[in-house]
Amino acid sequence: MAIRQRRLLIGWWGKLVFLVAVLVWVGLRAPCVALADEPARGAMVDVARLEATARRAGLRIVSGERLVLVTDRPARAGDGVDDLPRIFDEAFATWCDHYALDPKGVPSWRAFGCLMSDREAFRAAGLLPADGTIPDFANGFCDRNRFWLVDPANPAYRRHLLLHEGVHAFTLTLRSLAAPTWYTEGIAELLATHRLEAGRFEPTPIPRRADEVEQLGRIEAIRRLRVSGEIPGLADVFATPPSPRHDIPAYAASWAATALLSGHPSHAKRFRALESGPLDARLTPRLEASDGWDGDLAARDFDAFTDDVDHGYDFSRSAIEWTDGRPLTRRATSFVAADRGWQPSGWSMKEGEEAELVATGRAGVGRAGAIDLESTADGISLRWYRGRPVGRLLVAQWAVPAEGGRPRFVVIAEGETARFSAITTGALYLKLNAPPGDLAGFDGGLDVEITPVAAQAPRQRRGNER
Protein backbone atom coordinates (compact mmCIF):
# COMPACT_ATOMS: atom_id res chain seq x y z
CA MET A 1 0.00 0.00 0.00
CA ALA A 2 2.80 2.41 0.93
CA ILE A 3 4.61 1.65 -2.33
CA ARG A 4 1.43 2.33 -4.34
CA GLN A 5 0.90 5.65 -2.51
CA ARG A 6 4.49 6.69 -3.25
CA ARG A 7 4.00 5.84 -6.93
CA LEU A 8 0.79 7.91 -7.03
CA LEU A 9 2.56 10.79 -5.29
CA ILE A 10 5.47 10.67 -7.74
CA GLY A 11 3.01 10.55 -10.62
CA TRP A 12 1.16 13.65 -9.41
CA TRP A 13 4.44 15.53 -8.85
CA GLY A 14 5.55 14.64 -12.35
CA LYS A 15 2.31 15.98 -13.80
CA LEU A 16 2.63 19.15 -11.73
CA VAL A 17 6.21 19.76 -12.85
CA PHE A 18 5.17 19.19 -16.47
CA LEU A 19 2.26 21.64 -16.11
CA VAL A 20 4.50 24.34 -14.60
CA ALA A 21 7.03 23.85 -17.40
CA VAL A 22 4.30 24.27 -20.02
CA LEU A 23 3.03 27.45 -18.35
CA VAL A 24 6.53 28.91 -18.19
CA TRP A 25 7.13 28.07 -21.85
CA VAL A 26 3.87 29.73 -22.88
CA GLY A 27 4.69 32.77 -20.79
CA LEU A 28 8.10 33.17 -22.39
CA ARG A 29 6.54 33.03 -25.85
CA ALA A 30 3.73 35.46 -25.04
CA PRO A 31 4.14 38.67 -27.10
CA CYS A 32 2.47 40.96 -24.58
CA VAL A 33 3.70 42.76 -21.51
CA ALA A 34 2.74 40.93 -18.34
CA LEU A 35 -0.26 42.86 -17.04
CA ALA A 36 -3.38 42.14 -15.08
CA ASP A 37 -6.42 41.58 -17.29
CA GLU A 38 -7.88 44.82 -15.97
CA PRO A 39 -6.33 47.72 -14.04
CA ALA A 40 -6.97 47.71 -10.32
CA ARG A 41 -10.39 49.22 -9.58
CA GLY A 42 -8.92 51.84 -7.26
CA ALA A 43 -6.57 53.06 -9.99
CA MET A 44 -9.43 54.14 -12.27
CA VAL A 45 -12.05 56.85 -12.04
CA ASP A 46 -15.68 55.87 -12.58
CA VAL A 47 -16.39 57.05 -16.14
CA ALA A 48 -20.10 56.19 -15.99
CA ARG A 49 -20.57 58.33 -12.88
CA LEU A 50 -18.75 61.29 -14.47
CA GLU A 51 -20.77 60.92 -17.67
CA ALA A 52 -24.00 61.06 -15.65
CA THR A 53 -22.77 64.22 -13.94
CA ALA A 54 -22.06 65.80 -17.33
CA ARG A 55 -25.54 64.93 -18.57
CA ARG A 56 -27.16 66.57 -15.56
CA ALA A 57 -25.10 69.71 -16.25
CA GLY A 58 -26.32 69.79 -19.85
CA LEU A 59 -22.85 69.47 -21.35
CA ARG A 60 -22.31 68.07 -24.83
CA ILE A 61 -21.17 64.43 -24.80
CA VAL A 62 -19.56 62.48 -27.65
CA SER A 63 -18.26 58.99 -27.01
CA GLY A 64 -16.63 55.93 -28.52
CA GLU A 65 -15.45 52.55 -27.33
CA ARG A 66 -12.51 53.92 -25.33
CA LEU A 67 -13.37 57.59 -24.68
CA VAL A 68 -16.22 59.65 -23.28
CA LEU A 69 -15.55 63.26 -24.24
CA VAL A 70 -17.49 66.08 -22.59
CA THR A 71 -17.37 69.67 -23.83
CA ASP A 72 -19.03 73.04 -23.43
CA ARG A 73 -18.00 73.89 -26.98
CA PRO A 74 -21.10 74.53 -29.14
CA ALA A 75 -21.62 72.02 -31.95
CA ARG A 76 -20.27 73.40 -35.22
CA ALA A 77 -20.39 71.63 -38.56
CA GLY A 78 -16.98 70.43 -39.66
CA ASP A 79 -15.12 71.20 -36.42
CA GLY A 80 -14.07 67.56 -36.08
CA VAL A 81 -15.11 67.22 -32.42
CA ASP A 82 -17.59 64.43 -33.14
CA ASP A 83 -14.75 62.44 -34.77
CA LEU A 84 -12.41 62.65 -31.77
CA PRO A 85 -13.65 59.52 -29.92
CA ARG A 86 -13.25 57.41 -33.07
CA ILE A 87 -9.74 58.77 -33.66
CA PHE A 88 -8.97 58.10 -29.99
CA ASP A 89 -10.08 54.47 -30.46
CA GLU A 90 -7.77 54.11 -33.48
CA ALA A 91 -4.88 55.63 -31.53
CA PHE A 92 -5.59 53.32 -28.58
CA ALA A 93 -4.87 50.33 -30.85
CA THR A 94 -1.52 51.88 -31.79
CA TRP A 95 -0.62 52.45 -28.14
CA CYS A 96 -1.46 48.84 -27.33
CA ASP A 97 0.79 47.73 -30.18
CA HIS A 98 3.64 49.94 -28.94
CA TYR A 99 3.50 48.33 -25.49
CA ALA A 100 2.73 44.80 -26.79
CA LEU A 101 -0.57 44.87 -24.91
CA ASP A 102 -3.59 42.91 -26.13
CA PRO A 103 -6.56 45.32 -26.14
CA LYS A 104 -8.88 42.35 -25.60
CA GLY A 105 -7.25 41.97 -22.19
CA VAL A 106 -8.63 45.34 -21.06
CA PRO A 107 -12.16 45.34 -22.50
CA SER A 108 -13.62 47.78 -20.00
CA TRP A 109 -10.86 50.41 -20.13
CA ARG A 110 -12.24 53.87 -20.92
CA ALA A 111 -11.02 57.42 -20.47
CA PHE A 112 -13.04 60.49 -19.55
CA GLY A 113 -11.98 63.74 -21.19
CA CYS A 114 -13.12 67.32 -20.68
CA LEU A 115 -12.67 69.68 -23.64
CA MET A 116 -13.11 73.09 -22.04
CA SER A 117 -13.83 76.49 -23.51
CA ASP A 118 -14.79 77.86 -20.08
CA ARG A 119 -13.20 76.15 -17.07
CA GLU A 120 -15.82 77.64 -14.74
CA ALA A 121 -18.59 75.64 -16.42
CA PHE A 122 -16.77 72.44 -15.47
CA ARG A 123 -16.03 73.64 -11.95
CA ALA A 124 -19.70 74.47 -11.49
CA ALA A 125 -20.67 71.01 -12.73
CA GLY A 126 -18.25 69.34 -10.32
CA LEU A 127 -16.10 68.01 -13.17
CA LEU A 128 -13.02 70.17 -12.48
CA PRO A 129 -11.91 70.06 -8.84
CA ALA A 130 -11.42 73.45 -7.22
CA ASP A 131 -9.77 72.12 -4.05
CA GLY A 132 -6.18 72.35 -5.30
CA THR A 133 -5.82 68.64 -6.09
CA ILE A 134 -5.47 69.51 -9.79
CA PRO A 135 -2.66 71.99 -10.61
CA ASP A 136 -3.23 75.18 -12.54
CA PHE A 137 -2.37 73.75 -15.96
CA ALA A 138 -1.91 75.77 -19.14
CA ASN A 139 -3.11 73.36 -21.83
CA GLY A 140 -3.95 69.98 -20.37
CA PHE A 141 -3.64 67.70 -17.38
CA CYS A 142 -4.31 64.01 -16.70
CA ASP A 143 -5.30 62.22 -13.51
CA ARG A 144 -5.42 58.46 -14.02
CA ASN A 145 -7.93 57.78 -16.84
CA ARG A 146 -9.42 61.28 -16.57
CA PHE A 147 -8.06 64.37 -18.29
CA TRP A 148 -8.83 67.99 -19.07
CA LEU A 149 -7.72 70.15 -21.98
CA VAL A 150 -8.25 73.80 -22.81
CA ASP A 151 -9.88 73.93 -26.23
CA PRO A 152 -7.43 75.26 -28.84
CA ALA A 153 -8.66 76.97 -31.99
CA ASN A 154 -6.76 74.70 -34.40
CA PRO A 155 -8.40 71.29 -35.09
CA ALA A 156 -5.08 69.51 -35.74
CA TYR A 157 -3.58 70.75 -32.49
CA ARG A 158 -6.84 69.91 -30.66
CA ARG A 159 -6.49 66.28 -31.80
CA HIS A 160 -2.83 66.20 -30.78
CA LEU A 161 -3.51 67.64 -27.34
CA LEU A 162 -6.39 65.19 -26.79
CA LEU A 163 -4.19 62.23 -27.77
CA HIS A 164 -1.24 63.51 -25.70
CA GLU A 165 -3.42 63.45 -22.60
CA GLY A 166 -4.86 60.14 -23.76
CA VAL A 167 -1.39 58.59 -23.77
CA HIS A 168 -0.95 59.80 -20.20
CA ALA A 169 -4.26 58.15 -19.23
CA PHE A 170 -3.21 54.94 -20.97
CA THR A 171 0.26 54.70 -19.41
CA LEU A 172 -0.81 55.84 -15.93
CA THR A 173 -3.47 53.16 -15.61
CA LEU A 174 -2.35 50.31 -17.88
CA ARG A 175 1.41 50.61 -17.30
CA SER A 176 1.48 52.16 -13.79
CA LEU A 177 3.56 55.03 -15.15
CA ALA A 178 5.81 56.76 -12.61
CA ALA A 179 8.76 57.50 -14.89
CA PRO A 180 11.05 60.55 -15.15
CA THR A 181 9.64 63.62 -16.88
CA TRP A 182 11.61 63.16 -20.11
CA TYR A 183 9.96 59.80 -20.72
CA THR A 184 6.51 60.71 -19.41
CA GLU A 185 6.20 63.75 -21.68
CA GLY A 186 8.35 62.42 -24.50
CA ILE A 187 6.34 59.24 -25.02
CA ALA A 188 3.08 61.20 -24.85
CA GLU A 189 4.35 63.49 -27.61
CA LEU A 190 5.71 60.60 -29.66
CA LEU A 191 2.56 58.44 -29.55
CA ALA A 192 0.20 61.39 -30.03
CA THR A 193 1.91 62.77 -33.15
CA HIS A 194 -0.12 61.75 -36.18
CA ARG A 195 -1.72 62.71 -39.45
CA LEU A 196 -5.14 61.86 -40.85
CA GLU A 197 -5.14 59.49 -43.81
CA ALA A 198 -8.61 59.44 -45.39
CA GLY A 199 -9.87 60.72 -42.04
CA ARG A 200 -8.24 57.94 -40.03
CA PHE A 201 -5.46 58.07 -37.44
CA GLU A 202 -2.01 57.39 -38.89
CA PRO A 203 0.91 57.53 -36.41
CA THR A 204 3.82 59.71 -37.53
CA PRO A 205 6.28 59.87 -34.59
CA ILE A 206 8.37 62.19 -36.77
CA PRO A 207 5.92 64.30 -38.82
CA ARG A 208 6.25 64.03 -42.58
CA ARG A 209 5.15 67.59 -43.34
CA ALA A 210 4.53 70.74 -41.35
CA ASP A 211 0.96 71.12 -42.64
CA GLU A 212 0.04 67.74 -41.12
CA VAL A 213 0.83 68.93 -37.60
CA GLU A 214 -0.32 72.54 -37.54
CA GLN A 215 0.78 74.52 -34.47
CA LEU A 216 2.67 71.53 -33.02
CA GLY A 217 6.03 73.22 -33.54
CA ARG A 218 8.31 70.56 -32.01
CA ILE A 219 10.75 70.40 -34.93
CA GLU A 220 10.71 74.18 -35.30
CA ALA A 221 11.49 74.52 -31.58
CA ILE A 222 14.49 72.18 -31.93
CA ARG A 223 15.75 74.25 -34.86
CA ARG A 224 15.41 77.51 -32.90
CA LEU A 225 17.27 76.02 -29.95
CA ARG A 226 20.05 74.88 -32.28
CA VAL A 227 20.37 78.29 -33.92
CA SER A 228 20.47 80.04 -30.54
CA GLY A 229 23.02 77.59 -29.12
CA GLU A 230 20.60 76.60 -26.33
CA ILE A 231 19.81 73.06 -27.44
CA PRO A 232 20.18 70.60 -24.53
CA GLY A 233 22.28 67.47 -24.66
CA LEU A 234 20.82 64.05 -23.92
CA ALA A 235 21.99 64.13 -20.29
CA ASP A 236 20.25 67.50 -19.87
CA VAL A 237 17.01 66.03 -21.22
CA PHE A 238 17.27 63.05 -18.88
CA ALA A 239 17.47 65.55 -15.99
CA THR A 240 14.31 67.50 -17.00
CA PRO A 241 12.54 68.38 -13.72
CA PRO A 242 8.83 67.75 -13.12
CA SER A 243 6.57 70.73 -13.79
CA PRO A 244 2.84 71.24 -14.42
CA ARG A 245 3.70 73.91 -17.01
CA HIS A 246 6.36 72.60 -19.38
CA ASP A 247 7.22 75.00 -22.18
CA ILE A 248 7.47 74.08 -25.85
CA PRO A 249 11.30 73.57 -25.80
CA ALA A 250 10.99 71.10 -22.90
CA TYR A 251 8.32 69.11 -24.74
CA ALA A 252 10.33 69.25 -27.97
CA ALA A 253 13.53 68.01 -26.33
CA SER A 254 11.68 65.17 -24.55
CA TRP A 255 10.04 64.20 -27.83
CA ALA A 256 13.43 64.22 -29.56
CA ALA A 257 14.97 61.92 -26.92
CA THR A 258 12.18 59.33 -27.17
CA ALA A 259 12.15 59.60 -30.98
CA LEU A 260 15.88 58.88 -31.06
CA LEU A 261 15.78 55.99 -28.60
CA SER A 262 12.75 54.34 -30.20
CA GLY A 263 13.71 54.93 -33.85
CA HIS A 264 17.51 54.81 -34.14
CA PRO A 265 18.82 51.38 -35.18
CA SER A 266 21.54 51.50 -32.51
CA HIS A 267 19.08 52.09 -29.67
CA ALA A 268 15.59 50.90 -30.65
CA LYS A 269 15.91 47.26 -29.55
CA ARG A 270 17.29 48.24 -26.15
CA PHE A 271 14.58 50.86 -25.69
CA ARG A 272 11.81 48.37 -26.50
CA ALA A 273 13.21 46.01 -23.88
CA LEU A 274 13.34 48.87 -21.37
CA GLU A 275 9.69 49.77 -22.02
CA SER A 276 8.60 46.19 -21.42
CA GLY A 277 9.74 46.53 -17.81
CA PRO A 278 8.60 48.87 -15.04
CA LEU A 279 8.02 52.47 -16.09
CA ASP A 280 9.09 53.80 -12.72
CA ALA A 281 11.46 56.39 -11.28
CA ARG A 282 14.50 54.20 -12.03
CA LEU A 283 13.82 54.06 -15.76
CA THR A 284 16.82 56.24 -16.68
CA PRO A 285 19.33 54.40 -14.43
CA ARG A 286 18.12 51.07 -15.85
CA LEU A 287 18.61 52.38 -19.38
CA GLU A 288 22.13 53.55 -18.58
CA ALA A 289 22.96 50.22 -16.89
CA SER A 290 21.49 48.07 -19.67
CA ASP A 291 23.68 45.69 -21.62
CA GLY A 292 25.55 47.44 -24.43
CA TRP A 293 24.52 50.99 -23.50
CA ASP A 294 27.11 53.53 -24.62
CA GLY A 295 26.28 56.92 -23.15
CA ASP A 296 28.82 58.78 -25.27
CA LEU A 297 27.46 57.22 -28.46
CA ALA A 298 23.86 57.98 -27.50
CA ALA A 299 24.77 61.60 -26.66
CA ARG A 300 26.49 62.00 -30.02
CA ASP A 301 23.57 60.41 -31.87
CA PHE A 302 21.21 62.80 -30.08
CA ASP A 303 23.31 65.83 -31.03
CA ALA A 304 23.43 64.68 -34.66
CA PHE A 305 19.66 64.14 -34.68
CA THR A 306 18.79 67.53 -33.20
CA ASP A 307 21.15 69.22 -35.66
CA ASP A 308 19.68 67.62 -38.79
CA VAL A 309 16.09 66.89 -37.72
CA ASP A 310 13.37 68.03 -40.07
CA HIS A 311 9.97 66.82 -41.26
CA GLY A 312 10.23 63.34 -42.74
CA TYR A 313 13.50 62.50 -40.97
CA ASP A 314 14.23 58.80 -41.47
CA PHE A 315 16.72 57.10 -39.13
CA SER A 316 17.30 54.30 -41.63
CA ARG A 317 18.81 56.86 -44.03
CA SER A 318 20.23 59.41 -41.59
CA ALA A 319 21.73 57.37 -38.71
CA ILE A 320 25.47 58.02 -38.53
CA GLU A 321 28.12 55.32 -38.88
CA TRP A 322 30.73 56.80 -36.55
CA THR A 323 34.31 55.93 -37.48
CA ASP A 324 37.81 57.24 -36.85
CA GLY A 325 38.92 56.83 -40.46
CA ARG A 326 42.45 56.26 -41.75
CA PRO A 327 44.95 59.14 -41.80
CA LEU A 328 44.87 61.01 -45.11
CA THR A 329 48.51 60.64 -46.20
CA ARG A 330 47.97 60.23 -49.94
CA ARG A 331 45.39 60.79 -52.63
CA ALA A 332 42.22 58.92 -51.68
CA THR A 333 38.77 58.39 -53.13
CA SER A 334 35.35 58.02 -51.56
CA PHE A 335 31.82 57.54 -52.85
CA VAL A 336 28.96 59.57 -51.37
CA ALA A 337 25.47 58.11 -51.84
CA ALA A 338 22.74 60.62 -52.68
CA ASP A 339 20.04 58.85 -50.64
CA ARG A 340 21.85 58.94 -47.29
CA GLY A 341 22.65 61.60 -44.69
CA TRP A 342 26.15 62.11 -43.31
CA GLN A 343 28.47 59.26 -44.36
CA PRO A 344 32.07 58.50 -43.31
CA SER A 345 34.58 59.16 -46.06
CA GLY A 346 36.91 56.56 -44.57
CA TRP A 347 39.62 59.18 -44.01
CA SER A 348 40.70 61.48 -41.20
CA MET A 349 42.83 64.61 -40.90
CA LYS A 350 44.70 66.36 -38.11
CA GLU A 351 43.78 69.88 -37.08
CA GLY A 352 45.42 72.39 -39.40
CA GLU A 353 46.21 69.90 -42.17
CA GLU A 354 45.11 70.98 -45.63
CA ALA A 355 43.68 69.05 -48.55
CA GLU A 356 42.06 69.54 -51.92
CA LEU A 357 38.98 67.82 -53.26
CA VAL A 358 37.58 67.15 -56.70
CA ALA A 359 34.12 65.62 -57.04
CA THR A 360 32.79 64.06 -60.25
CA GLY A 361 29.60 62.42 -61.46
CA ARG A 362 25.90 63.19 -61.34
CA ALA A 363 23.31 62.11 -58.80
CA GLY A 364 19.53 61.92 -58.96
CA VAL A 365 18.00 64.49 -56.60
CA GLY A 366 14.27 63.92 -57.00
CA ARG A 367 11.72 65.17 -59.48
CA ALA A 368 10.15 68.44 -60.59
CA GLY A 369 6.78 67.42 -61.97
CA ALA A 370 7.50 64.73 -64.57
CA ILE A 371 11.18 65.67 -64.88
CA ASP A 372 13.93 63.68 -63.13
CA LEU A 373 16.45 66.07 -61.60
CA GLU A 374 20.19 65.43 -61.62
CA SER A 375 22.94 67.34 -59.88
CA THR A 376 26.68 67.68 -59.96
CA ALA A 377 28.60 68.37 -56.74
CA ASP A 378 27.77 72.08 -57.04
CA GLY A 379 24.05 71.38 -56.58
CA ILE A 380 21.04 72.67 -58.50
CA SER A 381 19.86 76.26 -58.33
CA LEU A 382 16.22 75.15 -58.74
CA ARG A 383 15.99 74.06 -55.08
CA TRP A 384 17.74 75.27 -51.96
CA TYR A 385 17.89 73.87 -48.44
CA ARG A 386 19.37 75.60 -45.40
CA GLY A 387 21.05 78.23 -47.50
CA ARG A 388 22.70 75.90 -50.04
CA PRO A 389 21.60 74.34 -53.35
CA VAL A 390 20.09 70.87 -53.07
CA GLY A 391 22.56 68.20 -54.21
CA ARG A 392 25.65 70.23 -53.27
CA LEU A 393 28.50 68.15 -51.87
CA LEU A 394 29.31 68.96 -48.24
CA VAL A 395 32.43 67.88 -46.34
CA ALA A 396 32.41 68.19 -42.56
CA GLN A 397 34.04 67.22 -39.29
CA TRP A 398 32.31 66.56 -35.97
CA ALA A 399 33.21 69.48 -33.69
CA VAL A 400 31.92 72.24 -31.45
CA PRO A 401 31.14 75.13 -33.86
CA ALA A 402 33.01 78.42 -33.58
CA GLU A 403 29.89 80.15 -32.26
CA GLY A 404 29.59 77.58 -29.46
CA GLY A 405 26.76 75.25 -28.49
CA ARG A 406 26.48 71.49 -28.76
CA PRO A 407 28.79 69.51 -31.12
CA ARG A 408 27.63 69.10 -34.70
CA PHE A 409 28.90 68.48 -38.21
CA VAL A 410 30.79 71.65 -39.14
CA VAL A 411 31.10 72.06 -42.92
CA ILE A 412 34.71 72.71 -43.95
CA ALA A 413 34.41 72.30 -47.74
CA GLU A 414 31.73 72.10 -50.42
CA GLY A 415 31.14 71.91 -54.15
CA GLU A 416 32.97 70.32 -57.08
CA THR A 417 36.42 71.63 -56.14
CA ALA A 418 37.76 73.08 -52.92
CA ARG A 419 40.87 73.54 -50.83
CA PHE A 420 40.23 73.25 -47.10
CA SER A 421 41.79 72.86 -43.66
CA ALA A 422 40.79 70.47 -40.90
CA ILE A 423 39.33 72.35 -37.92
CA THR A 424 39.91 69.45 -35.52
CA THR A 425 41.64 66.08 -35.50
CA GLY A 426 39.09 63.58 -36.70
CA ALA A 427 37.23 61.87 -39.50
CA LEU A 428 35.84 63.52 -42.62
CA TYR A 429 32.14 63.01 -43.38
CA LEU A 430 30.32 63.60 -46.63
CA LYS A 431 26.76 64.11 -47.83
CA LEU A 432 24.75 65.83 -50.54
CA ASN A 433 22.73 68.75 -49.21
CA ALA A 434 19.05 67.81 -49.00
CA PRO A 435 16.01 67.81 -46.71
CA PRO A 436 16.10 64.50 -44.79
CA GLY A 437 12.54 63.74 -45.85
CA ASP A 438 13.52 63.83 -49.55
CA LEU A 439 16.35 61.29 -49.40
CA ALA A 440 14.15 58.34 -50.37
CA GLY A 441 13.62 59.99 -53.78
CA PHE A 442 17.35 60.44 -54.46
CA ASP A 443 19.59 57.90 -56.22
CA GLY A 444 23.14 57.37 -57.37
CA GLY A 445 25.98 59.40 -55.97
CA LEU A 446 29.28 61.15 -56.59
CA ASP A 447 32.94 60.15 -56.58
CA VAL A 448 35.09 62.34 -54.35
CA GLU A 449 38.87 62.50 -54.65
CA ILE A 450 40.74 64.06 -51.71
CA THR A 451 44.44 64.88 -51.89
CA PRO A 452 46.50 66.06 -48.91
CA VAL A 453 48.53 69.26 -49.32
CA ALA A 454 52.12 69.36 -48.06
CA ALA A 455 52.14 69.76 -44.27
CA GLN A 456 52.05 73.38 -43.08
CA ALA A 457 52.05 74.97 -39.65
CA PRO A 458 48.51 75.22 -38.26
CA ARG A 459 46.95 78.58 -39.11
CA GLN A 460 46.33 81.12 -36.35
CA ARG A 461 42.79 80.54 -35.12
CA ARG A 462 40.24 83.13 -34.10
CA GLY A 463 39.71 83.50 -30.38
CA ASN A 464 36.14 82.13 -30.47
CA GLU A 465 37.07 79.06 -32.52
CA ARG A 466 37.71 75.75 -30.94
Image (spheres, rainbow, N blue to C red):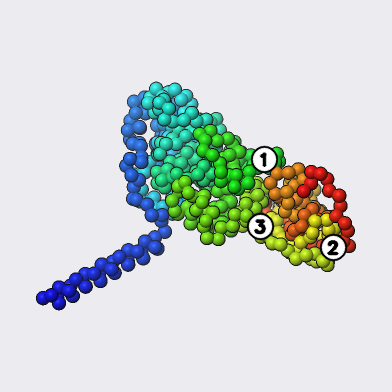
Camera-side mark, 3 or 2: 2
In the rendered structure, which amino acid carries the disc numbered 3? Ile
Q: How many marks?
A: 3
Please, is residue 130 above or below residue 311 in the view? above
- Residue underneath mark 2: 452
Circles 2 and 1 in contact, beta carbons < 8 Å: no
Q: Which residue is drawn at 80% across and 56% down?
A: 351
Image position of 238 (left or right of 109):
right
User: Given the current orientation, which residue lies at the most extreme bottom position?
Assistant: 3
Query: How would you rate the neighbour count of disc 1 (Cα within 10 Å): few for under 14, some for 14-19, many for 20 or more?
Result: some
Label of residue 320 in the image: 3
The residue positioned 85% from the left and 62% from the top of the image is: 452
Quadrant of residue 268 within the rendered picture? bottom right
Q: Earlier in the sequence, mark 3 or mark 1?
A: 1
Q: Is mark 3 on a helix, strand or loop?
A: loop
Percent position of residue 331, x then y: 83, 66
Which numbered disc flags the more N-terminal residue, 2 or 1?
1
**What is the secondary structure assignment of the residue under circle 2?**
strand
Numbered tag placed on residue 362 in the rendering: none
Towards the viewer: 436 or 136: 136
Q: Residue 147 location, x and y as percent?
A: 43, 35
Q: Which amino acid does the dot numbered 2 rest on? A: Pro
Q: How far across and down, in percent of the image, does residue 65 sit? A: 38, 42
Could you give the CA–CA distance between mark 3 and mark 1, rounded to whole angstroms?
23 Å
Q: Residues within 10 Å of mark 2 (few under 14, many from 20)?
A: some
Residue 126 locus on image (x, y percent): 37, 26
Q: Name the residue under label 1.
A: 230
Task: State the CA–CA distance, disc 2 to disc 1.
Answer: 36 Å
* Amino acid marked by disc 1: Glu
